[in-house]
Image (cartoon, coloured by chain):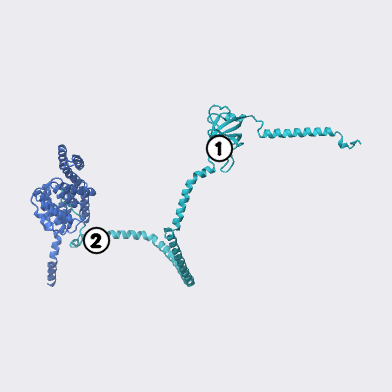
Amino acid sequence: MKNRIKFLFLIILFLPLILQGCYRAPIEEPYRVKEMESLIKRANRAFEKGNFKMALSLYEEALKKSRIIQDDNSTVMILLSLSRIYTSLDKIYYAEKCLNSAEELSKKTYLPESLFEEIIFEKARIGFLTNKNSEALLDKLIYSDSPYMRIKSLNLLARFKMRRGANEEAEEFLNKSLSMNNEISKIEQANTLRLLGELYAKKNKNKSLTYLLRALSIDRELALPEKIALDMEILAGLYKDLEDKGRAKDYFLRAFEIWKYLGREENQIRIMRELESL
Amino acid sequence: MVIKHKDPRFIFLKGKIVIFIIVALVGALSFLYFAGKQRGLFTKTENFYCVVSKATGVYTGMSVRLSGFKIGRVQNMELMDDGFVRITLSIEDKHTKWFREGTVAILTKEGFIGEYYIEILPGQGALIKPKQTIKFFRHSGIEEIAAELKGEISEILKGIKETINYVNEPQGDIKKSIHNIEKISQNLVDTTNKLNFLLDDIKDKTPSILAKSENTIEELTELIKSLQNSAKHLNEITSNFNEITKKDLTLIIEQTKRSMEDLDEILTSIKGIWPIREGIKKRDIKPLEADSYEK
């Protein structure tokens, strides 16, 4: 009798632990973890080189691995990365789908704050790209603990404001971002300067020129072809407004060459039109 | 009474006197001939002229040379009505061939303080006939050079004088500098004295230092000896150890390797077991973060 009571007591004591343990796979299979990590690294490298299709394929493979080992944290991270790749490939529908899955999964698992904030930011960014009103998502992010997240949220918020024509508010956000960004993120510093350049393009052309040239200088330092092309295109537009046709043409041609190298046909067509109008 | 010269020395005395007179005359004439010949009295000469404004340094009998060889002499100098001086050069006939158009006579000296002479520089043109005038130049002697340099030397001397005055000025920089150098020298002397004192002091203390050093060296020598002995022992031990481990070491390493691999597998398995895996920090792999200006 006593033995039965002991046995029942032990079962009651360890039952929650046994149930928790059975909920997940008993063993993570370390070699699969290694494979997944390797796939993610390769995918990131491919994305940095502009090989989006390769990055997509590798991330899809990594997603399968992450599900096999039931690593929710990695799955969220992979879904987030997939969302970014799909936006780069102009497949917004798939991007949103990935993001929604990541958001759903994030509710079931414990995620680091930074990853959670990254999901919200991505959602706001896709909202901006699809002309949806997702400004409110950034209200919390501009007070994030991470300075980097604060800076890029302020910049994205400024883009929302500029689109709505609230230039004064946008300028306020951008100046705040610029003052906060003390060597935290050079990419975001260049983004802020570029946005300020766009903002001043009509009211103070000289100031706009200064901001844009600074942005170009930083992007050249970082060797980001896409951003360099963007800076050059905006600069060319500004020179066109200043009726400096020589420089305008020069910058348009340089931007055209970079877009051609990156295979962005849409951008090439846009520049060709600008060149024809010169 | 008629004196009879019976002494044999008086026999043919008249004849002897005549012969003596003839020989003496012939000798005298020969001497005069050779002397005249030597002096060029019998050499045929031709005259050439030079007209100069000033004949200082030129005198009658002055030698005329060509390439260092005497070819004639100054025969005469005469002041003409226009105030110029005409110098007559008597040139040996055989050397007149050098007198061509463009020939010039230069009054020069043997060195700076030697004798004056006239040097002929032959021309390249047609032969000049005797009694023609050739150009005359004067080569600067030491007097002329001195006269030319007089002005420059005066200026240099003036400069030297000014420099000396500047140096001698009591409140001048140089006097002050000399005064300072004197002070420095005095200080140097003081420093040297102090150094000497210091060296003497060191000299006094040196024997005690040396004694201590000797002791230390002795101790060090002993220490080195004992270290050498220890090293010998250590070498022996190492060689023994090598001999012992030579065979077994490979086996030990292989076994350790296998054990480590097994341990790694066990640890990996343990890491994967819940709830241990929850406590293990995940590897830092970041997602592709989009920036604020991304498409």
Q: Which residue is mark 2?
A: B267
Helix, strand or loop at label 1? It is loop
The image position of residue A138, as x and y in percent, is 11, 55
Camera-nearest residue between B215 and B238: B215
The disc label shown at residue A22, or none: none
Would residue B213 be found to the left or right of residue A90 on screen?
Answer: right
Q: How many marks?
A: 2
* Chain of the residue under the numbered disc 1 shown in the image: B
* Chain of the residue under the numbered disc 2 shown in the image: B
Q: Looking at the picture, which amino acid does disc 1 mark?
A: Ala
Crowdedness near tag 1: few (<14), some (14–19) or many (≥20) residues, C-alpha within 10 Å? some
Helix, strand or loop at label 2? It is helix
Chain A as rendered: colour: blue
Camera-nearest residue between B40 and A125: B40
Q: Is residue A117 above or below residue A274?
A: below
Cβ atoms under marks 1 and 2 closer than 8 Å: no
The image position of residue B287, as x and y in percent, is 18, 53
Q: Mark 1 to mark 2: distance in Å? A: 127 Å
Q: Which chain is cyan?
A: B
Same chain, labels 1 and 2: yes
State whether residue A111 appears in this view.
no
The image position of residue B103, as x and y in percent, is 54, 31
Between marks 1 and 2 in the image, the one whose residue lies nearer the viewer = 1
Labels 1 and 2: the sequence-earlier one: 1
The image position of residue A42, as x and y in percent, is 22, 50
Q: Which residue is mark 1?
A: B55
Q: Looking at the picture, which amino acid does disc 2 mark?
A: Leu
Camera-nearest residue between B61 and A244: B61
State whether residue B231 appears in this view.
yes
Crowdedness near tag 2: few (<14), some (14–19) or many (≥20) residues, C-alpha within 10 Å? few
Residue at (45, 57) in percent of width and height: B167
